[in-house]
Amino acid sequence: MKRQAGPITILIADDDADDRMLIKDAFESGKLNNKLEFVEDGEELLRYLRREEEYADLHDSAYPGLILLDLNMPKMDGREALKELKADRRLQRIPVVVLTTSEAEEDIVRTYGLGVNSFITKPVTFAELVEVVKVLTNYWVEIVALPPECDSVDAAA
């Protein structure tokens, strides 16, 4: 089954440089060609989505089709960012998948209560991470119909 739409941008919010590199490598290893963008904390995530400051030039671009969100980040953690994102009428429909080291039931319950679409504990091995990003990409890129504001990237981007 293939969705009739263009590629999407996947926005990854994670403060750990090694984790960002591993996620990027997992997408490349899985031969997944969607555009990846990275932010390092919840404040930067919201500036990116709201097209503020250094992200003002994205004003006419589609929103990401998927956000992968770490919970434990400096400045504003993923929980706080998720709460703000889901309270913002312009942003609340963007799918968010928590991808974190946390296995705490409290985090699972709280983030679903805040409107997260899925909660995934980061895999231990690189091979498992590749499999997770393949499954995520298959579901969120190939199967799911996204809201129009985040359905495709600008071909010139």
Image: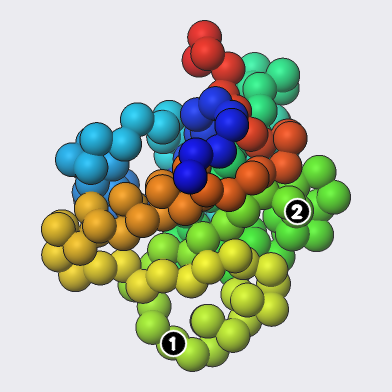
Question: Do the CB atoms of the residues marked 1 and 2 lie less than 8 Å apart?
Answer: no
**Does 52 appear above or below 95?**
above
Q: Residue at x 59, y 65 (%)?
A: 117
Q: Secondary structure at mark 2?
A: loop
Q: CA distance from mark 1 to mark 2?
A: 24 Å
> Residue at the front extreme?
1
Q: Residue at x 43, y 29 (%)?
A: 35
- Residue 101 percent across, percent down from the top left: 34, 72
> Residue at the right extreme?
89
Left-right relation of 7 to 23: right
Which amino acid, by three-letter code, is at mark 1? Ala
- Residue 27 percent across, percent down from the top left: 28, 41
Left-right relation of 23 to 87: left
Residue 4's quadrant in the figure? top right
Can residue 56 be seen from the camera position used here? no
> Residue at the top extreme?
156
In depth, the one of 1 and 35 nearer the eye is 1
Give the residue at mark 1. 104
Give the residue at mark 2. 92
Crowd tier of the residue under label 2, counting other residues whose Cα lies within 10 Å: few below 14, some 14–19, many 20 or above: some
**Does 90 appear above or below 60?**
below
Which amino acid, by three-letter code, is at mark 2? Gln
Q: Residue at x 81, y 52 (%)?
A: 88
Q: Residue at x 73, y 34 (%)?
A: 149
